[in-house]
Amino acid sequence: MSELTDTCQDLRRRVRDLVAEWDFTPRCDSWASGYDPDFSQELGRRGLLAVTWPKEFGGAEGTNVDRFAVSEELLRAGAPVAAHWVGERQIGPSLLRHGTRELQEEFCPPLARAEYRFALGMSEPDAGSDLAAVRTKAVRDGDSWRVTGRKIWTSGAHRATHLYLLARTSQEEDKHAGLTEFIVSMDSPGITVSPILDLRGEHHFNEVVLEDVHVPGRWVIGDIGAGWPQVVGQLSFERGGPERFLSTYPLLTAVLRANLADDTARRELRALAGRLQVLRRWTLENARAMDAGHTPSTHAAMSKYLGNKFERDVIAWARPLMPRADRSIRALYDQAVAASPASGIRGGAAQVMLSVIAKGKK
């Protein structure tokens, strides 16, 4: 089945027009570290964000395949999309699935305009990316909640207006039970954000400490204690998209445009190109499954696991060519190398992905 609908082609053209007009330097890992709020808001003004959302909440009522077309064009260009990526990719869709009408009206339109910036408070120091082991606690305080705990590897928390938070609201024998999703204002008293620098000394990861932080009762997402099945669905948006194999695409294309590939590299490139096409088709199937109302958790985990391996192999392919590369290509290579360890963790480490895949195949 082809995704080349007229709508997809129009969206791709509109993204390319904006990318051609905008002054930016393409970079690898742009969805996590390419930060330009003005660019994100211009995408919103041109109707290129929230394309799957209802029009009453700022969307275009398109499909996830339409959104795939927009995302693919932005990632190929290495465009600065980090300011809106998390909020538009998974927080808005999660609110539309599980949020109250009040919560949807409060957050979805500003997210569609890229006015709110979200960070993800999922992983923890003692739990890693095993979300069932989350220890951050939320306790009732009248009509509100008080949250205490620590989150780690929280991309963009130092620039975020809000934090998506997974916290434990009760202790149950089943560790998957008793979890609840919240929205937390980053302006709240009791929040401390500490930087975690990557291998190049760049700052986009953080540790977030919450000490008795007040959260309004209306900012609970979905049902109290039902956070696990909700977050599993949300992770399908996080793990199953093209960012899992296109983070290094700017490096790949820059090497080819500069004609740096020797005979060995060209032979290896054929295998990489074949894998890229398989990953692309796989991700489109994820989008179609979501359009059909399914939650492709296992498929998304496989996309994330294989996409991360592909990106590491692109770096290994480019490495012997770097002595002949100019400064701009070398910068792309350095960005890809610096982001590689974190790319394996974001959205779940490889061991977690293999566990999800194994359970899904039973």
Image (cartoon, helix red, strand yellow):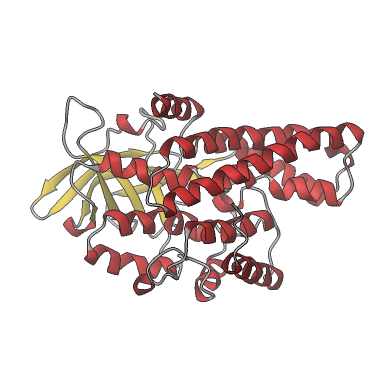
Question: Which x, y percent locates residue 6?
Answer: 60, 69
What is the residue that sits farthest to the front in this orientation?
Answer: 1
Pick the quarter of the image with the C terminus.
top left
The answer to whether residue 79 of the structure is visible from this angle is: no
Question: Which x, y percent locates residue 201?
Answer: 61, 42
Quarter assignment of residue 147: top left
What is the residue that sits farthest to the bottom in this orientation?
Answer: 45
Q: Nearer the viewer, residue 352 or 5?
A: 5
Instruction: Judge from the rendering whether residue 217 lies leftward or rightward of residue 206; answer left or right.
Output: left
Instruction: Judge from the rendering whether residue 268 lies leftward or rightward of residue 349; answer left or right.
Output: right
Q: Nearer the viewer, residue 164 or 146?
A: 164
40 to 264, vertically: above or below? below
Question: Which x, y percent locates residue 61?
Answer: 42, 68
Question: Which x, y percent locates residue 240?
Answer: 50, 44
The answer to whether residue 105 of the structure is visible from this angle is: yes
Name the residue located 60 percent from the left edge and 45 percent from the top edge: 281
What is the residue that sits farthest to the left in this orientation?
Answer: 142
Name the residue located 41 percent from the left edge and 56 percent from the top edge: 118
Q: Nearer the viewer, residue 183 or 47?
A: 47
89 to 10, vertically: above or below? above
Name the residue located 16 percent from the left edge and 31 percent from the top edge: 171
Quarter assignment of residue 179: top left
Q: How many marks?
A: 0
124 to 14, vertically: above or below? above
Instruction: Judge from the rendering whether residue 268 lies leftward or rightward of residue 20; answer left or right.
Output: right
